[in-house]
Each structure stands twice: as structure tokens, then as C-alpha cells.
Image (tube, rainbow, N blue to C red):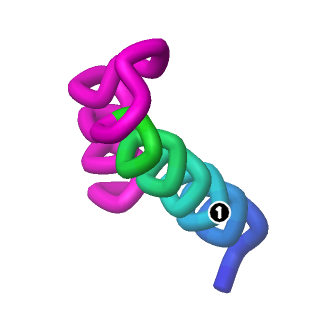
Amino acid sequence: MSIKKIISVTVGCICLAFGTVGVVLPVLSTVPLYLATAFCFAK
């Protein structure tokens, strides 16, 4: 695996975790985080 792919998957996992926490907490917005997750995992 290349370093770009590892970084992309790591950032995608972090965005997914924050988006899931954002479902419960109204402070975090979920939709942009889930879109960032989809963008990172698509690469």
C-alpha cells in the first residue's frame, strides 16, 4: 500500500468516527463528515 492510501483510509476512519459521534451530539455536523468519509474511502 502506498502512503497516500494509508493516510486516506486513516482520515476516512477518523471522519467516520466523528460523524457517528455527531449523530448523538448536535454540535458536530454529520453530513459533511460522512461525505468526507465517502470521498476518502473512494480513493
Task: Give the vertical position of 17 relative to 5 (above or below).
Answer: above
- Where residue 6 sits, quadrant-wise, is bottom right
Q: Is residue 3 left or right of residue 28?
A: right
Q: Residue at x 34, y 39 (%)?
A: 24
Q: Residue at x 29, y 39 (%)?
A: 23
Q: Is residue 20 left or right of residue 42?
A: right
Task: Give the vertical position of 37 relative to 25 (above or below).
Answer: below
Q: Quadrant of the C terminus?
A: bottom left
Secondary structure type for disc 1: helix
Residue sitting nearer the eye, 19 or 1: 19
Mark 1 residue type:
Thr
Query: How many numbered marks are there?
Result: 1
Q: Residue at x 50, y 55 (%)?
A: 17
Residue bearing the label numbered 1:
10
Residue sitting nearer the eye, 31 or 21: 21
**Magenta segment, prevailing SS (helix, strand or loop):** helix
Q: Is residue 11 left or right of residue 7?
A: left
Q: Residue at x 28, y 57 (%)?
A: 42
The stretch in magenta equals 23-43
Residue sitting nearer the eye, 20 or 14: 20
State the image coordinates of residue 28 (x, y, percent, origin top left).
Answer: 45, 20
State the image coordinates of residue 8 (x, y, percent, origin top left).
Answer: 58, 56
> Outermost residue, bottom direction?
1
As for residue 12 lying within the magenta part, the answer is no
